[in-house]
Amino acid sequence: MNINDTNAVSEIKALALDMISNAKSGHPGIVLSAAPIIYTLYARHLMVNPENPEWINRDRFVLSAGHGSALLYATLHMCGYNITKEDLKQFRSIDSKCPGHPEYGITPGVDMTTGALGQGIANAVGFAFGERYLESYIKKEEETQNLIDYRTYVLCGDGDLMEGISYEATSFAGAQKLDKFMILYDYNKMTNDGSTSTNFLEDIEMRFEAMGFYVDVVKDGTNLKAIDKAITNAKKSKKPSLIIFNTILGQGSMNENKSVVHGTPLSDDDIFAIKRKLNVTVAPFEVRKDTVVHVRTLIKERVEQKYKDHMMYFNKIKSSGNDKLINVLRALINKEVPISFDSANYRVNDTYNEEMRMTNHKILNLVAAKTDMFLGGSADLASSTKAYIDNTHINSLEHPLGRNINFGIREHAMAGILNGMSMIGLKTYCSTMLAFSDYLKPAMRMSALMNLPITYIFTHDSIAIGQDGPTHEPVEQLLTLRSMPNMITFRPCDFNEVLGCWEYICKNKKPVNLVLSKQKVPKIPNSNAKLVPAGAYIIGKEDQRLDGILIATGTEVLTAMKMKEELKKENLDIRVVSMPSQELFLKTDKNYQNGVLPKNIRTIIIEPSHKMNWGLFVPDEKYILGVNDFGYSGKPEDVLKKCGFDYETLKMRVARLLREN
């Protein structure tokens, strides 16, 4: 370390403060406390190539403390990524390369969208877990491989470690012994509302040591030599690592060590004084050219030969004719795994009658047989959800190629970890009961935001599960899942529709919720896998005239079909529409929609979920036969009757509504 390194840290601080000041919005506190940490990591350790930000064997860096985005963008600019001063000046502006929090695909060098605290830690665990799987897989094909061999680093603050997801994810990382995973902890003891002395008192060193981490403490988080040494030592450990850097929030500001400096831009006088102390140019967005050259030279000299060697090996694999390795390359480059799956190739006989979770288990295994890049797990419920891959191990250090992941009872971390795994090109799924989908929501939202093709499998999909009681009986969950932008939710009615869901999953790069019943369901006449991507279709056509339409999903399609036949005897000729996906149906053209659901025809919804799900499809709530209250503990038939959702009650209500003037 020399004066050029000190100057580089100062220039990064100044640039980031200028960005925040120019935007009149941002978080200067972390800029002044964590700049030495992030600079040392990029300049001395990260194996990255700013000229090829998507290099598949680069080290991954996740800024879990995403409010420190100005610090990251300033660092990336100094390192030579394609982020200009003009880009920095547009910080937090519409369509800027430098959004308020880091967003993957927007800014060169940003490996993960972050902002909601703690998420980035789980994502980084996913990067490290996925790296071990891919490295082991390639080594099985070629023992001397160097195609995949990278480390994952994450920078976090106090707020990240307060969030429960971070504890879930790091506990999992410790149990998995992910030795290429490192947390850099900016420990300044100050959050948005003040000192952590009233709410965050545990011994972090002991906590992480107990979870199986190598832990080190740097007493002075501004000491570049000490930071460098700590990272160097941690890289030698056979455990995941945590380095605690003692820092001062907003160090050097008039408001240092005060909560106000966390998220409030500094005054012009404060910035002027800080720049004078740092011995940098006072003019905004000005940096020394020799300092920029120093930083970029450090990275180039350290990485250049490894990058060249890797690209030679990459090209060798590309032309090797080894289909398995070539498919891995495609997945890594395109961040998706194309799976050839045609629902028309599969049939069941007419006597089929099976729990849909078991049906899904069989189809999931048909998909898994087509590619080794497909894996996933459950939050300790695989025995209940049946979402697991046969004839493979549970993944561990001893079995790094196991394709079943036992996440333990950690739903939130499970989804966050899958985001990281998906980001490097693996096709992933996870499962739990539908009522527990609420535990996953923040991470699922990030899946949708980044358009990551993760399949969320939710079973036990209604009050009909009965005796587990209202804590386990979903009511509002479908509403919240369907309302999430860029997320597709399926509730299929039988074997054929589950096939259609998986064909969609295999052919589309989309996050998907697959909602399945615990109940047995036969093959329903006219169910059609190929029509599932349309979102809805006519499964039971009227005979002569159209007296009304029943829209149903899941197990209620069978109910509607039975009702159709019985109401025919009462001189009511109705159509049944199966709607496995509201979202996909609403994306079809108006002609198709009007053909399935013609206007001015009385339409009734049957689904045991919150009625707010269905306001787009009927003019009045009375036509929605749903469930707006929590369920009960009892036999399924008794719970359904008490909720007014037993067959006879539903049939009576439908007949009455259809006969209304």
Image: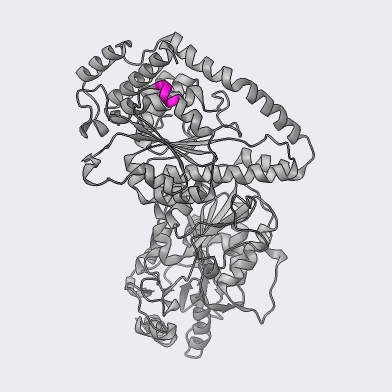
Q: In x, y percent, where is residue 114?
A: 41, 40
The quadrant where residue 227 appears = top left
Q: In x, y percent, where is residue 408?
A: 48, 59
Residue lying furthest right:
321
Inspect this view and state whether residue 348 appears.
yes
The residue sitting at 61% across, 34% down in the picture is 56
- In-front residue for pair 506/557: 506
The residue sitting at 40% across, 20% down in the picture is 86
Seen in the image, is 508 located left or right of residue 658? Answer: right
Q: Is residue 573 above or below residue 391?
A: below
Q: In x, y percent, where is residue 337?
A: 63, 48
Q: Which residues are magenta?
A: 224-228
> What main secondary structure does the magenta stretch of the protein show?
helix
Q: In x, y percent, where is residue 61?
A: 48, 34
- In-front residue for pair 240/493: 240
Seen in the image, is 164 located left or right of residue 365? Answer: left
Q: Is residue 393 above or below residue 160?
A: below
The residue sitting at 38% across, 45% down in the picture is 206
Residue lying furthest bottom:
569
- The quarter of the picture where the N terminus appears is top left
Is residue 226 rendered magenta in the image?
Answer: yes
Inspect this view and state whether residue 425 appears.
no
